[in-house]
Amino acid sequence: MNILKSIQHIAKSPFVNMGPIKLRQPLPNAGIENVDPFLLLHHYGPYAISEFNNPFDLGPHPHRGFEPVTLLFKGEQLHRDSLGNDMVVKAGGVQWTTAGRGIVHAEAPTKEFVKQGGDLEGIQLWLNLPSKHKLMPPNYQHLEAEQIPIVYSDDKKVKLNVIAGQQANEKGLITTQTEVNVFTANAEKDGEIQINLPDNHQSLIYLLEGDVLINSKEVLKKGGNQMIVFSTNGNLISFKANENSTLLVLSGKPIKEKITQYGPYVMNTQTEILEAMRDYQQGKMGYLY
Ligand code: MN
């Protein structure tokens, strides 16, 4: 039987400064520490990138203990990492990095894109790893927009891109370490869709652009409330677009472990954080050439 999940939190997406970079951070947010297994959500841009304005240039830095995922909506970025990957992601594409025991990576708009100029917009999502996988070998998965399976709403006005997990008869191509659904949605005005999310998953919808009515009840609108977190009860969510809209839909089975986070590391204990800092300094997470 299909039962709508109830709405637990509704939240704005305030701007924060990450060094010189100004971006939106819906998660963590006042009152919401995380939506286990999702730890952090950064929404960057749209920035008008040019040779004179290139704020989103992240030099080499390490990670351990979780999966940083980049979903690019506009523009073109270069990803380089200590595994030797050197990959360009374009709008609609996905970079899924499993930091595991350690990786060093860098992300920035490609030189060609900076020269040519244009909008850059993306989501960076931090997905936790359970303790048994925190020190797994690092890995990198890459999807181009064309590879991503699509589920259409009955009215054909909503396109749901199945990046990871499953919806209707479509399965995402990303190999995940825990049960998660990562979908993006492009909705035309008046388009409506129902999405099945398991009742043992925590889940949320984040609005990047537009205006939508969620579960026939709460409105998300760019610049106003942009995120809804659902309760674990129920197995269905729905939305109707009041304008052309772009959304992110996440659900995952909670890991339910103690989290100790420091900068780019997400572990279970303070000792493990100190080990991560030492291992990075000793070069055990690799190098970027
Ligand atoms: Mn990173």
Image (spheres, grey):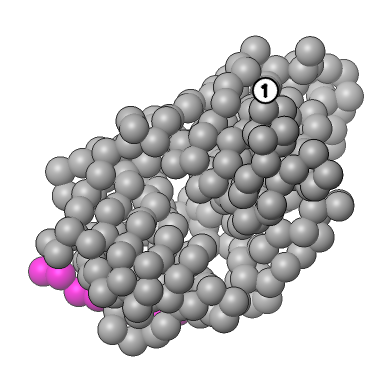
Seen at 58% across and 41% down, the residue is 75
Note whether 256 is above or below 277 in the view shown: below
Residue 239, given in percent of the width and then of the height, sits at 30, 72
Which residue bears the numbered disc 1? 80
Say left or right for 192 vs 181.
left
Note whether 236 is above or below 91 in the view shown: below
Seen at 43% across and 30% down, the residue is 143
Q: Secondary structure at mark 1?
A: strand
Seen at 57% across and 81% down, the residue is 224
**Most common secondary structure along the magenta stretch:** loop
Note whether 84 is above or below 261 in the view shown: above
The image quarter containing residue 265 is top right
Which amino acid lies under the numbered mark 1 shown in the image of this protein?
A: Arg
Say left or right for 155 vs 58.
left
Tell me where the magenta segment starts and ends, as one range.
Answer: 1-8
Residue 92, given in percent of the width and then of the height, sits at 44, 41
Say left or right for 284 vs 120.
right
Residue 179, given in percent of the width and then of the height, sits at 37, 44
In this view, the residue farthest toward the bottom is: 217
